């Protein structure tokens, strides 16, 4: 089953799609990359993911799988090489817990801080910093969340390493303080220097232009409302 054709429907700046791309590459799986225009969604995307109509979508053996965390687990269960999730059930549960924490708490607060203003922005920045400090405790003393190798949780939280610095610049805010989060700062360096990650990062300049354009559009829409 693992040898059948694999396709990934993605969007270049999507952190959710990027984690799936990294998982496939870490496991050495050949796949076809299909870039999606998320602002003018293709019939292919709507056919493969009719419920959420979002990237990423993994296609394997002519079957489609949606939602990045679900895709990561599918990849790990389908291809045995380079395990992503820990072997022990408790450690697997912890990895899933912190992955959800990163998505539901940290990413949510960062998004509000990026788009908000005034007290709302200040409160969200504070909430994001608190979340980061909790993640800091989880990575202390480790090279990666997965131990000596990049694992499931590293992929789930990988967006922190390259996307938050861009959003900090665009949003005129600081989420990651190297003084209060030295272990995360070290992990970011280790993660970004891994050959698989380094060779497939979205270009920083392109991300800056993309998110600056997003913010400019948001400001225009607010001024017209």
Image: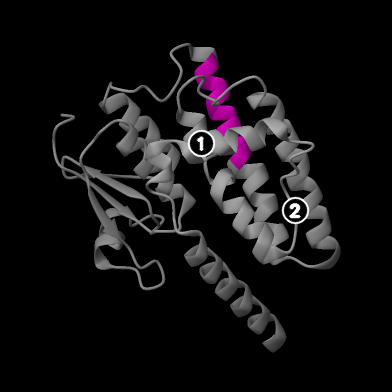
* Magenta stretch contains residue 80: no
- Label 2 and label 1: CA atoms lie apart by 20 Å
**Label 1 element class:** helix
- Provide the residue designation for mark 2: 174
Quadrant location of residue 133?
top right
Q: Is residue 9 above or below residue 224?
A: above
- Provide the residue designation for mark 1: 191
Quadrant location of residue 83?
top left
- Residue 190: in sight, yes or no? yes
Task: Characterize the local packing of mark 1: few (<14), some (14-19) or many (20 or more) Cα atoms within 10 angstroms.
Answer: many
Specify the label residue 161 is tagged with.
none
The answer to whether the residues at label 2 and label 1 have Cβ atoms under 8 Å apart is no
The residue under the point 16% across, 40% down is 61
Q: Is residue 117 left or right of residue 168?
A: right
Residue stretch in magenta: 91-102
The residue under the point 69% across, 64% down is 171
The residue under the point 55% across, 39% down is 157
Q: Is residue 38 left or right of residue 104?
A: left
Residue 7 image point, x, y percent: 23, 48
Position of the N terminus by quadrant: top left
Q: Is residue 40 above or below residue 6?
A: below
Position of the C terminus by quadrant: bottom right
Residue 120 image point, x, y percent: 81, 61
> In this orientation, which residue lies closer to the viewer: 155 or 71?
155
* Magenta stretch contains residue 99: yes
Residue farthest along the top direction in this orientation: 88
């Amino acid at each position: 089953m693992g040898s059948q054709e694999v396709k990934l429907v993605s969007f270049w700046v999507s952190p959710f799609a990027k984690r799936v791309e990294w998982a496939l590459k870490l496991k050495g799986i050949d796949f076809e990359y299909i870039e999606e225009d998320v602002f003018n969604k293709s019939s292919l995307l709507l056919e493969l993911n009719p419920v959420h109509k979002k990237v990423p979508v993994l296609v394997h053996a002519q079957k489609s799988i949606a939602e990045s965390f679900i895709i990561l687990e599918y990849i790990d269960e389908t291809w045995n090489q380079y395990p992503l999730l820990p072997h022990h059930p408790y450690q697997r549960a912890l990895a899933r817990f912190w992955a959800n924490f990163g998505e539901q708490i940290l990413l949510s607060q960062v998004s509000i801080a990026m788009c908000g203003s005034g007290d709302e922005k200040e409160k969200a920045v504070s909430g994001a910093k608190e979340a980061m400090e909790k993640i800091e405790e989880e990575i202390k003393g480790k090279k990666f969340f997965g131990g000596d190798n990049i694992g499931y949780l590293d992929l789930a939280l990988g967006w922190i390493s390259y996307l938050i610095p861009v959003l900090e610049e665009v949003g005129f805010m600081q989420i990651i303080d190297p003084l209060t989060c030295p272990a995360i700062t070290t992990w970011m360096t280790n993660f970004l220097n891994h050959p698989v990650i380094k060779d497939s990062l979205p270009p920083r300049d392109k991300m800056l232009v993309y998110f600056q354009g997003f913010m400019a559009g948001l400001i225009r829409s607010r001024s017209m409302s």
